[in-house]
Structures are given as C-alpha cells and as structure tokens.
Amino acid sequence: MDSLIPRPRAEIAPGAVHLPDWLDVERQRELVTACRSWATPSAGFGAARLPNGGVMSVRMVCLGWNWVPYRYSRTLADGTPVTPFPDWLADLGQRAVAEAYGDPAAEYRPDVALVNYYDETAKMGLHQDREERSPEPVVSLSLGNSCVFRFGNTENRGKPWTDVELCSGDLFVFGGPSRLAFHGVTKTRPETGNPEIGLPSGRLNITLRVSGLD
C-alpha cells in the first residue's frame, strides 16, 4: 500500500476496529516464520471438509484447540495433540485488544488460534464465529497479500455490510455488539504483499480467540 495514502484507524461497527499497519515489518517476518514452524507434517496446512461435503479453499493450521467444522477438538484428525498455544502469542493478542479499544488494562488471554493460508483464488464465505463459549473479542492479524474483508451485521449474511481492504500488518478486532457479526473474505489481491516479510505469495491470516472451554 502506497505510504502517501493515509490509512487511519477506523471503527467499522460498534466494537469492530481496524488498525492499519499495526505490525512492523520485523514483527510480520517473525510471525511468518512462526507460521512455518507450526505447519509441521502432522499439523497442516490442510483444507477443512464441511458437513455438506464441500472443501474450504483456504488451508488451515490450529493452535491450542483444533477447529473441526463446527466445533473444537484437542486432537488432530489422526489423533495427535494439537500444537500448543504459545504465551507470547497470547501477549500479542492482549496488546492488540488494549490498543484497539484504548484500554491498557484489558484482560484478554486467547487460547486458540486459527492460521489460514489464502492462495490467489481462495475466499472465505460469510460466517459467524460461534464455536467459542466466551464472548471475548476476535483478533485478526494479516500477513502477505491484501484482501477484501467483508464485515456484515449480526442477523444474516445480507446487507448492510462494509468492505475493508486488509493489508499486510493490519489488525482487525471485533467484539462487544459486533462479536457475532457475519464476516468473510471476498477476494485476495495477488502480488500486493511485501516480499521483505518472507512470504513470497499468498496471504496468512492469524485469528485469536478465547475458547471458554476447559
């Protein structure tokens, strides 16, 4: 994204906040490296199969809890334990919520992360994040190619919605009255990422949640 074009902080809906360029290049590079380490041969990246038989176009690896449409499990499909959720990532999530909501004392300790990889054709249909028992916010971190992120209402997949361009390094947090808003990715934009972060193609999206599960 051209640095001459201002990209100010924006509240897209009550409780839904976009902070452009929140991660600097060094931090983005560290996260890309971490994502590679999490994608061990047994853990992913894999495409989830939905109950209707469809296969998601994004590929995913999970930390803390394994997302299985539409529930969480402590094990992968082959029975091996899911990759542990690192404390440093929880600290990053806590800082994200504190800065998004302007609350330095925010107590936010995520215990699950969904790491999605989008190639040039991948999309994510409008959906709600309903598998968590906790109402705590969802934290979304973008790396690599930019995308069109559609943020909708809490009632259905129809309008009103707002399309937001998420670029590498952007933070998006949604909680409170927007916690169950429908949202998705309508398209990714090829060759819009920064090669300095070590991701030559595609987009990585790390979403952090508080499961509320024992």
Image (tube, rainbow, N blue to C red):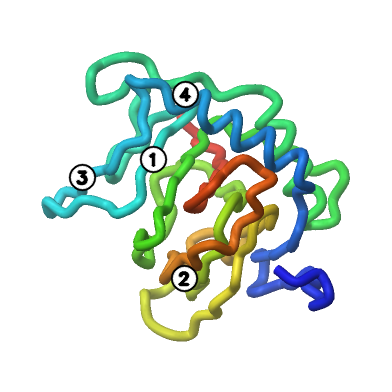
Give the mark, 1 or 4, whose residue is nearer the N terminus. 1
In the rendered image, is residue 137 in sight?
Answer: no
The x, y position of residue 153, in whole percent, is 48, 75
Question: Could you say where residue 15 lies in the image, as x and y percent from the top left?
Answer: 67, 64
Q: CA separation, marks 1 and 4?
A: 23 Å
Q: Amino acid at mark 1?
A: Met
Q: Which quadrant: the N terminus? A: bottom right
Name the mark nearer the viewer: 1 or 2.
1
Task: Give the residue pinned by disc 4.
Answer: 214
Circle 3 residue: 49
Label 3, label 1: how far apart the Cα atoms are: 11 Å
Look at the numbered disc 2 and give the secondary structure of its residue: loop
- Most distant residue in the top direction: 80
Name the residue at 60% across, 30% down. Answer: 33
- Give the Cα distance between marks 3 and 2: 25 Å
Q: Are marks 4 and 3 in contact (CB under 8 Å)?
A: no
Residue at (28%, 43%) from the top-left corner?
47
Q: Which residue is mark 1?
A: 60
Residue 122 rendering spot, x and y as whole percentages? 36, 59
- From the viewer's side, name the closer residue of 30 and 129: 30
Amino acid type of the residue that numbered disc 3 sits on in the rendered structure: Arg
Residue that numbered label 2 is attached to? 154
Location of residue 186 with respect to 24 vertically, above or below: below
Q: Which callout, 1 or 2, points at the residue further toward the start of the chain? A: 1
In the image, 48: left or right of 135? left
Residue 178 rendering spot, x and y as whole percentages: 57, 65
- Give neighbour class at mark 4: few <14, some 14-19, many 20+ (Cα, 10 Å): few
